[in-house]
């Protein structure tokens, strides 16, 4: 349950940062840097949570 909540929060943060990113300015703009860091961090969190969920499913199948 906590994993799904964390996954949902990470997706919401990713969407917020994608909408906050301004494509008209350069990447070196300070607001764009913050958005890119948020996008990268939430993407990493999503991948890690998905790996955790999949590994728990595999562990459950091995035990059965």
Image (spheres, grey):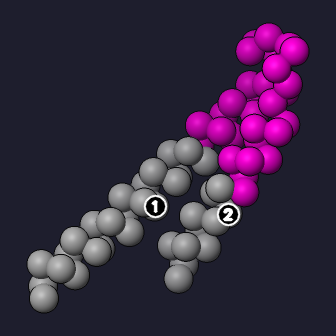
Please say if 21 is above or below 56: above
Mark found first going from the N terminus, 1 or 2: 2
Which residue does the image show at 38% across and 69% down from the upper left?
53
Left or right placement of residue 62 versus residue 53 in this view: left
Asked if the stretch drawn in magenta spans residue 31, the answer is yes
Q: Residues within 10 Å of mark 1 (few under 14, many from 20)?
A: some
Estimate the x, y position of residue 60 in percent, counting from the top left. 22, 81
Disc 1 designates what residue?
49
Q: Which residues are magenta?
A: 12-41
Crowd band around label 2 with a 10 angstrom C-alpha radius: few (<14), some (14–19), many (20+): some
Q: Which of the 4 quarters of the picture holds residue 51?
A: bottom left
- Residue 19 vertical position relative to residue 21 in the rendered view, above or below: below
Q: Position of residue 20 (x, y in %)?
A: 84, 37
Mark 2 lies on residue: 9
Residue at disc 2, secondary structure: helix
The question of residue 15 being in magenta is answered with yes
Question: Mark number for residue 17?
Answer: none
Question: Regarding mark 1 in the picture, which secondary structure is present there?
Answer: helix
Q: Position of residue 55 (x, y in %)?
A: 28, 66
User: Residue 47: x and y, percent?
Assistant: 45, 51
Magenta stretch, overall SS? helix
Kindly identify the residue that appears in the image at 76 percent across and 41 percent down.
17
């Amino acid at each position: 349950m906590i994993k799904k909540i964390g996954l949902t929060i990470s997706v919401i943060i990713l969407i917020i940062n994608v909408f906050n990113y301004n494509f008209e300015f350069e990447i070196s703009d300070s607001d764009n840097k913050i958005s890119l860091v948020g996008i990268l961090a939430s993407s990493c969190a999503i991948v890690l949570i998905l790996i955790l969920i999949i590994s728990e499913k595999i562990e459950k199948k091995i035990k059965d």
